Image (cartoon, rainbow, N blue to C red):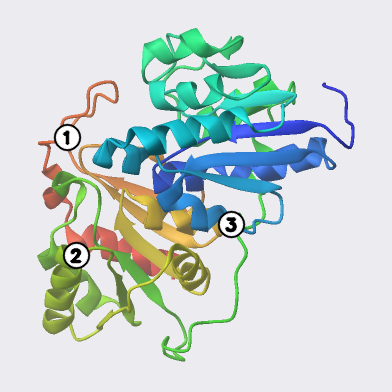
Amino acid sequence: MLMNTHNFRIAIVRLSALGDIVNTAVVLQIIHKHYPHATVDWYVEEAFAPILKDHPLLHEVIALPLKRIKKTKSFTLLRETIRNLKSRPSYDQIIDAQGLVKSALVTYFLKGDVHGFDRFSAREKFAAWFYDTASSIPYELNVIKRNVQVITEALKIPYDENDIFYKQPLFPSYPKPIWMEDSQKSIACVIGASWPSKCYPKEHFATLCSALPYPCYLIWGSEAERLDAQWIAENASNAILTPKMSLKELVNFISHCDLIIGNDTGPTHMAWAMNKASITLFGPTNERMIFPTVINLGIKSPSTVNILKINRNDFSIRDIDPSVVLKKAKELL
């Protein structure tokens, strides 16, 4: 194990996406267990920084405008970002927990030894050229186990799956939102996702909500998702449209729900992060994306998934019968 000193400095680079950040945050508790006095900074894409802001186990959250640089093609913003990275204090250990060229480039401008995935494990093989040391962890492995393993290996911490099983909620929670009904139990439905093929049909959600015995809150993020949620609410007596929420409000809302049912996307993964019951629905992806427990289940469509070459045109999630989801939901409730 590395020296456990009060000024030991660690940098985690995990830029995006929301679900990946949520599924990586468990490492903060593991690091704190072995290095209770370490200073841990997290480098993240600016859009996702709010979910990590004020986290009790983080010293600083460094928000990077990488998507904004790509969109605006602003050389001034790029130069400013690089200058800020170079001006950061040196670290005892820098860990690229993402394995992309863009995350590896962030580590390149920081001062300190860098650890990441080797070229056979990284999502983008060229990223491995930027690291001083690397872990060989099959890309097909469960994503949460991969996240934990690359960081524990970097810090010479023993990998213990019990640290994942028996985690505390990964993010702070606050009082229940005033707009939630004072019913016996509450269910959240995550109807959107990054690809259309990952989305369970709105008609199936309407059928499911109508059959469930408690209020079903429909979470939405974009205007298209809001319209779908509105359609579900109009066609299912038990469905309720939520207000638009910030990331922190979303985490807090989920912490007050009894069950989350949703597509393979960040808000659904927040249920596991907050130790809440969940059912994740899979079409073009599979259960590799979650850490299954007795209260965190996955339901996969009949299609076969090659995780190394995901078929974004696999719409087989439509073939998951709502009655199958309903049966599992009632068991969890």
* Residue 53: assigned label: 3
Query: Horizontal and vertical percent for residue 297?
Result: 41, 51
C-alpha distance separating marks 2 and 3: 26 Å
C-alpha distance separating marks 3 and 1: 39 Å
Nearer mark to the viewer, of 2 and 3: 3
Q: Is residue 16 above or below residue 140?
A: below
Q: Is residue 111 above or below residue 178?
A: above
- Mark 1 sits on what residue? 303
Q: Quadrant of the C terminus?
A: bottom left
C-alpha distance separating marks 2 and 1: 25 Å
Q: Is residue 55 above or below residue 289?
A: below
Circle 3 sits in a helix, a strand or a loop, which is it? Answer: loop
Amino acid type, label 2? Glu
Q: Residue at (75%, 24%) from the top-left corner?
A: 92
State which tag comes first along the sequence, 2 or 1. Answer: 2
Q: Residue at (66%, 22%) from the top-left corner?
A: 111
Q: Quadrant of the N terminus?
A: top right
Amino acid type, label 3? Lys
Q: Are marks 3 and 1 in contact (CB under 8 Å)?
A: no
State which tag comes first along the sequence, 3 or 1. Answer: 3
Q: Is residue 154 above or below residue 64?
A: above
* Residue 60 visible in the current orientation: yes
Q: Are marks 2 and 3 in contact (CB under 8 Å)?
A: no
Query: Horizontal and vertical percent for residue 133?
Result: 61, 10
* Residue 27 visible in the current orientation: no
Furthest toward the bottom, the residue is: 182
Amino acid type, label 1? Ser
Query: Horizontal and vertical percent for residue 267?
Result: 39, 58
- Mark 2 sits on what residue? 225
Q: Residue at (22%, 63%) from the top-left corner?
A: 222
Circle 1 sits in a helix, a strand or a loop, which is it? Answer: loop
Q: Residue 224: which quarter of the image?
A: bottom left
